């Protein structure tokens, strides 16, 4: 009986840890998105780059977290992994355009980044 209670407690703690990681990661992603947008609005290349860096760091967390623990429909796990890969590629393209000073092209890449975020939210939240 004690082993069963311990097992349930460990599973609950693991789930809570993943939820905290997801909440913290979403907060970082929000900060990154806001900083990139602020950089575009105020012509601040450094803000855009810092926001991209924050987004890259936050997105990389999903390479180490088991997303099936917080997705209600487990058949969507591969889709979220694909979105994660798309976000990685789109952030790389955004960074390339910003570094090259191609801000009109960069805004299009920023739109793709936001679309990646919304695609994942659509799956996770069932929008």
Image (cartoon, grey):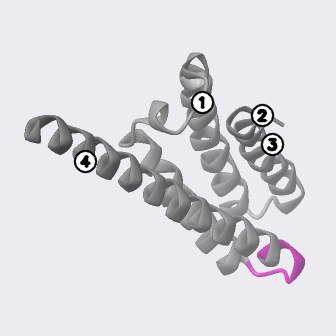
The Cα atoms of the two marked residues, 1 and 2, are separated by 9 Å
Label 3: few (<14), some (14–19) or many (≥20) C-alpha neighbours in 10 Å: some
Lower sequence index among marks 1 and 4:
4
In the displayed image of the protein, which residue is found farthest to the top? 75
Viewer-proximal residue among 100 and 67:
67
Lower sequence index among marks 1 and 3:
1
Residue 101 to residue 109: above or below = below
The Cα atoms of the two marked residues, 4 and 2, are separated by 29 Å
Label 1: few (<14), some (14–19) or many (≥20) C-alpha neighbours in 10 Å: some
Seen at 81% across and 42% down, the residue is 115
Q: Residue 7 at what x, y percent from top left? A: 19, 38
The quadrant in which residue 45 appears is bottom right
Q: Name the residue under label 1.
A: 72
The Cα atoms of the two marked residues, 3 and 2, are separated by 15 Å
> Which structural element holds mark 1?
loop
Q: The N terminus is located in which quarter?
A: top left
Q: Mark 3 points at which residue?
A: 115
Lower sequence index among marks 4 and 2:
4
Q: Where are the magenta residues, as a range? A: 39-44
Seen at 9% across and 41% down, the residue is 2
Tell me if label 1 and label 2 are in contact, CB under 8 Å. yes
Q: Residue 34 at what x, y percent from top left? A: 75, 72
Q: Name the residue under label 2.
A: 126
């Amino acid at each position: 009986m004690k082993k069963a209670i311990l097992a349930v407690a460990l599973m609950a703690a693991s789930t809570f840890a993943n939820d905290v990681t997801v909440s913290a990661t979403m907060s970082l992603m929000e900060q990154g998105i806001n900083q990139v947008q602020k950089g575009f609005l105020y012509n601040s290349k450094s803000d855009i780059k810092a926001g991209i860096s924050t987004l890259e760091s936050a997105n990389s967390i999903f390479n180490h977290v088991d997303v099936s623990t917080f997705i209600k429909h487990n058949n969507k796990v591969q889709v979220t992994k694909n979105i994660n890969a798309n976000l990685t590629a789109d952030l790389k393209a955004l960074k390339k355009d910003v570094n090259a000073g191609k801000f009109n092209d960069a805004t299009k890449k920023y739109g793709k980044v936001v679309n990646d975020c919304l695609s994942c939210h659509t799956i996770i939240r069932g929008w």
